[in-house]
Amino acid sequence: MSLTSLLKTPLGFLSAAAVALLAAAPAVFKAADLPFPANTLLLCLMYGILAMAWNLLSGYGGQLSFGHAIFFGVGAYTTMVLMLYYDITPWIGIVAGGAVAALVGAGLGVPLFRLRSHWFALATIAAAEIFRLSFIPWKWIGGSAGLQAPIVPREKALYYLQYAGSYVYCYVAMLFLAAELVVLHRVVNSRVGYYLQAIREDEDAAMAMGINPFKYKMIAMVVSGFFTGVGGGIYAVRFRFVDPFAVFDLITISVYIVVAGILGGMYTFIGPLVGAFVFMPITEYVRVYVVSRFPRYYGLHVFVLGVVLLVIALSVPEGIVGWLEEKGYVRKLKERW
């Protein structure tokens, strides 16, 4: 189908409109001086990258991971170290961070893929905690104090990817998200994607059919780790600060990724991205506007988020996109492609 014909379909038109709106949003926010919506949009894009990457391993491959903070932290630290110690532009550092995270994923896959089901999930939590504790005393990368990027002159802003606010970083995140969507779409619609789904449904049956589960789970781990590391690199250049407590955090990194993926629909391609665009605005609104009214009650935002997520989970247990497919809205649009 040609691009012109595709745009004439309802789904093609809606997709084009969404992309156009998304591309215009940062410029509109900057013109109107709205930093909060711009930062929220950046978090939606960043967690969209993370959730899409997580979904390849956990949704398609059936390997439920609560340890993706490992890849996020490694990508963030790699980007920051290359910039501070070796004067390498973050444009290269972000990709390098993804590559190092992918190598870490390959190394972790060897012992972790010996485990299945809940044992794999528990092992990923333990591995993430090991990484966090290992980075705290590591003085070369700042130890528990972390690393902070200095403010550079305006003429070097493009090289060091350093700008005020989240506006420019939204476009950087869009660029990497677009690349991820292309790569993951090719992966999940290839033999690798079909084999991963077969492994998810019944690993023993997949082995009986001649599929090597370790090989294809390892491919999923490496690709998933790469894009999660890219997300960590985007975080590092935007906030110009990394420490073990922030980038290896179980809740705000690993669990948030899982929630976004499940909320949007972990057995669908685009579901995790949708989940990120629903979950992060709720999270940021509660954190900024609800918690600020009750400063004495530490952790109130987590309680409120728990209630919101419980209601959503009871209403749409298959995720937002899964619910749309069940109701026939998405399926009807797909039939017109």
Image (spheres, helix red, strand yellow):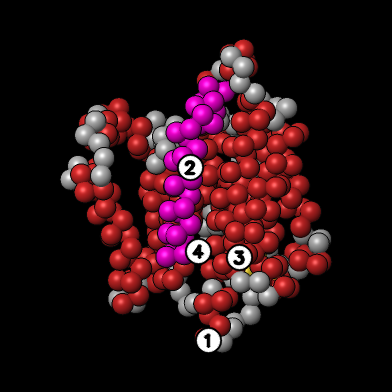
Question: Which of the image's four quarters has the N terminus?
Answer: top left
Q: CA distance from mark 2 to mark 3?
A: 21 Å
Tag 2 secondary structure: helix
First in sequence: mark 4 vs mark 3: 3
Kindly identify which residue carries mark 2: 184
Residue 317 lies left or right of residue 252; in this view the side is: left
The segment highlighted magenta reads 170-199
User: Was residue 181 drawn as part of the magenta stretch in this picture?
Assistant: yes
Q: Residue under label 3, please give it.
A: 92
Along the line of sight, which residue is nearer the eye, 215 or 21?
215
> From the viewer's perspective, is the residue at label 4 or at label 3 nearer?
3
- x%, y% of residue 238? 53, 68
| Of pointers 3 and 1, the one earlier in the residue sequence | 3
Give the side of residue 125 with respect to residue 285, left or right: right
Q: Position of residue 100 (x, y in %)?
A: 68, 53
Task: Please tell me how crowded label 2 is: few (under 14), some (14-19), or many (20+) other residues with Cα within 10 Å.
Answer: many
Question: What is the x, y in percent for residue 188?
Answer: 47, 35
**Residue 262 seen in this snapshot:** no
Mark 4 lies on residue: 295
Q: Amino acid at mark 2?
A: Leu
Mark 1 = which residue?
155
Q: Residue at x 54, y 25 (%)?
A: 195
* Real-space CA distance between mark 3 and mark 1, rounded to the nearest whole angstrom: 19 Å
- Residue at 36%, 32% in the rendered image: 322
Residue type, label 4: Pro
Q: Residues within 10 Å of mark 4 (few under 14, many from 20)?
A: few
Query: Which residue is located at x 68 percent, y 43 percent?
Result: 105
Q: Amino acid at mark 1?
A: Glu
- Residue 229 in the figure: left or right of residue 166: right
Q: Between tags 4 and 1, which lies in front?
A: 1
- Residue at (73, 73) in percent of width and height: 85
